[in-house]
Amino acid sequence: MRPEGATKAADVPAAGRRGSVLIVAFNYLPERIVGVLRPARFARLLPRYGYDTAILTATPQPEDAPLSIRQIPYIRTFPEKVIRKLFLPGEESIPWAGGAARMAAAMHRQTPFSAVFVTSPPWAVQRVGLYLKKKFGVPWVADFRDPMRGSSVRLDHAFPLHDGIFEPRVFRHADAVIANTDAVEKLWRKRYPQWAEKFRTIWNGYDPDEDVGPEPLPPRPFRVLGHFGEVFAYRHPGVLLGSIARLIDRGLLDPATLRIRFYGGSDALGDPGIRRNLEARGVIEPAPLPPFSEARREMAQSDYLLVIDFTTGAPGLQVPSKLYTYLRIGRPVLALTTPESPVSRILRNSGVRHACVFPDAPADRIDAEVLDFLRLPTDPVQPSSWFRENFDCTAQARTLAAIIDRIGRSR
């Protein structure tokens, strides 16, 4: 499961200047959401491989932001509000993309781009790549941090109709289409064999320059299982909480010995009755999601770490970005996932203690897995060399540079 072109960072050769790449990211630094990390890392690392970068974003920038970052304000219009409320809830950037395309064209006229890299969601931003491709012939890399079709977030309203039209249009015109897991790429190749040569995988990963690792555990009479990030109605820990409740009722788990902290807490924790029961026993502790640096400290001081990959109504296709941080911390990871998902395969090869709970398994099997997991030692373990070599973001940037080289030569 080695990402295409991935090498050890030390093996990456220096490169002369090859051109300039426009990165279109609706959300970008300094916004505090995990989706900004991927484009920000590419922006920082692509110059190592010969490509200067410019950024086009909707995120307001500080006064001292580099001149290479251009911000187009996102102004919500009444027609957009109606469309989103009735048909496409949560689908930001619909009117923003038009203004962004015009700004991108002006930037290209001033300093021509070798390629445009557009990362989504939100999905309308891909219109910027389509515009530059059709008007100027700029090679277009369409990057999907989440899939459109196949995501349970998009199973209702008008999403299936919209995605069935928009997705193949992107795939037809883009010069390269990037998935962030091999499972998504495999799905695309099966669905669109006519464009299979365009599909590539560039995994998310970790930044070796970031200081991430375990910290001493605070003295406390209980162990903490931490989850970091919002919990959604379609992706929730109900299976785990049901198991915890059963183990307590059977006398196999003392509720005083465990705290499950949901940083970024949510009401979408599964069965309300079970949630109230565990809250009353002090097991569940909702907490606000702190900024990145503080969240990493809380992760580093958790006994166990929880990742929720199982999504109702959809296969396990994605890898939550928090998993890469969890594995660098090295304490036991509990994953709610599906068999042979990218998450389960990464954990299997990571060298870090873990357990995978499959929500479709019989309740007694789930209970045994959870109980065995909570008995694991909490001393941290270094992740394997396989993990370090495959998910170092320096190698991911090298892969993207190679893709841009290829599509530039093919024109």
Image (cartoon, helix red, strand yellow):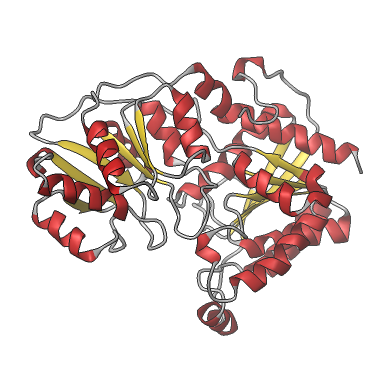
User: Does residue 357 lie above or below 278 as drawn?
Assistant: above
Q: Position of residue 333 (x, y in %)?
A: 34, 34
Task: Specify whether residue 264 is in view.
Answer: no
Q: Position of residue 361 (x, y in %)?
A: 37, 46
Which residue is painted at 30% across and 25% down in the image? Answer: 214
Q: Position of residue 271 (x, y in %)?
A: 26, 63
Q: How many marks?
A: 0
Task: Specify whether residue 327 is in view.
Answer: yes
> For the view shown, which residue lies furthest in the right direction?
411
Quarter of the rendering occupied by the N terminus: top right
Please tell me in which quadrant of the rendered image residue 277 appears. Answer: bottom left
- In this orientation, which residue lies closer to the viewer: 225 or 118? 225
- In this orientation, which residue lies closer to the viewer: 309 or 288? 309
Which residue is painted at 24% across and 26% down in the image? Answer: 376
Which residue is painted at 58% across and 61% down in the image? Answer: 122
Q: Is residue 148 left or right of residue 372?
A: right
Q: Position of residue 163 (x, y in %)?
A: 66, 66
Please tell me in which quadrant of the rendered image residue 259 appears. Answer: top left
Q: Is residue 409 left or right of residue 382?
A: right
Quarter of the rendering occupied by the C terminus: top right
Q: Is residue 393 left or right of residue 115?
A: left
- In this orientation, which residue lies closer to the viewer: 220 or 16? 220
Which residue is painted at 70% across and 27% down in the image? Answer: 5
